Amino acid sequence: MKPDHIILAADDDVAIALADLPAGHVAAGVTLTTAVPRGHKFARHAMAPGTQVRRYGQIIGQATAAIAAGDHVHVQNLGMSDHAQDYAIGADLRPITPATEARTFMGYRRADGRAGTRNYLGVLTSVNCSGSVARFIAEAAEKTDWFRALRNVDGIVPIAHSSGCGMAGDNEGYETLFRTLQGYARNPNFAGILLVGLGCEVMQIPALVGQARLRADGQFHHMTIQEQGGTRRTVERGVEALRDLAQVAERCTREPVPVSELVIGMQCGGSDGYSGITANPALGVASDLLVAHGGTTILSETSEIYGAEHLLTRRAVSAEVGEKLLSRIRWWEDYCARNKGEMNNNPSPGNKRGGLTTILEKSLGAVAKGGSAPLEGVYLFAEPIDRKGFVFMDSPGYDPCSVTGQVASGANLIVFTTGRGSVSGYKPVPCIKVATNSEMYARMDEDMDINTGDILEGVTLEDKGREMFEMFIRVASGEVTKSEALGFGGAEFVPWQIG
């Protein structure tokens, strides 16, 4: 018989239902006082109001009302609590044993030494005002005979957004957008970039281009609509520029590349009570495998590690790295305070329906994506990742925005775990979707690439992590993911608009 519950740590105050359990059912040695949905928590013993409640062996909140043994533990009786932690920077630092086998994927080697997993052309915009024209250019180019004749180019990606003007020109928001646009222009999954502006915006094209070449391979053109003389002339000139870029991109071919050149952005969205049990820890195993092979994995969503940051600082390779992470936590606390928000605004309604109650609980499950490797570095949103290993990039918990920062930082592959069923894609970077439970996987099998619900049926985390790792290599080599096949990626460029 399949187990009906799981206890994640010996001193946990709650157990997790693995099926919809009725009132009166006996599980974990207690009789349920009410029905408990799958993925939700029930009390292993009585708890008085104010009691700190533990899951994963960590505090997830405190009882806001008296809880009896067998009670459903959720929003009606569990809330946020003081979660001061012992950050003990570096105390749990354990190096990952390097892999003995040399693995490769078939990728595109770029002039700057990095490797792409796809071979796109991009039409990047400096401002929302040029977004429609960027789409007109891409659509016109895709109708040409020269485009239809291409064999090695994956497509043209117009990248429109809602910012670039109506903003200060020298503050944190400007610097964040600046890094994001430059990062996309340099992402190794692009074989060439056309940058289009209006001309009078705050985010000026000359500033983005800078003194040196924006791309090491010279595969870069830029123009403004005002200088070209309007929409029609800009579209005509833009199509010509793309044709020039395509001639070079068409000569790019896949070649064996060490897996150490993979840079994987790790995300979770639409999480449920199983996320921290199945998909996220399995991804943590896969992350450690890639790090052992010399690759890079990026954990993000600062507001979704809140309350679990001590699990990362204790793995930091230096005091500087640990303190940099804590400085971002303090930034977020101040950000929420001055904007009259709260860190516990997350979990979302969908997360709560899936069994997650507080941000502390959600964060403890989210951090599991990071495995056990040392924390090598902490980066600002869209800041270029300049070292190998497991790293953290600051970002909001809004998935498209967080992935946008990871792609700008240099990610050439995204892995996204979901329990509720998030659907999205992130051109030019392929996205692997991982389901946390078998029910949702069966219901949304056309969107999900991997099911980790079978971990609850006996498949080990190690085996599932190895399965993910092998899929990393296949997708990096050209295997099409479900989100790519469905055509996702045209609406998910979401720069972080601070404020």
Image: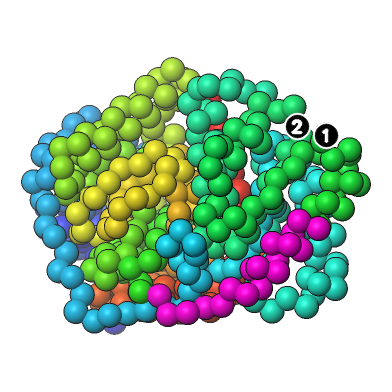
Type of the residue with mark 1:
Gln
For the magenta stretch, what is the residue range? 240-257
Drawn side of residue 126 relative to residue 272, left or right: right
Whether residue 457 is visible here, answered yes or no, is no
Q: Are marks 1 and 2 in contact (CB under 8 Å)?
A: yes
Residue 466: which quarter of the image?
bottom left
Picture disc at residue 443: none
Residue 411: which quarter of the image?
bottom left
| Camera-side residue of 416 and 342 | 416
- Per the image, the residue denoted by label 2 is 199
Residue 161 point in image, percent of width and height: 67, 41
Residue 346 point in image, percent of width and height: 43, 39
- Per the image, the residue denoted by label 1 is 226
Mark 1 or 2 closer to N-term? Answer: 2
Residue 379 point in image, percent of width and height: 35, 42
Q: Residue at x 73, y 38 (%)?
A: 197
Residue lying at the far top of the rendered structure = 338
Q: For residue 490: magenta? A: no
Q: Residue at x 43, y 62 (%)?
A: 114
Q: CA distance from mark 1 to mark 2?
A: 6 Å
Drawn side of residue 346 relative to residue 26, left or right: right
Drawn side of residue 4 relative to residue 340, left or right: left
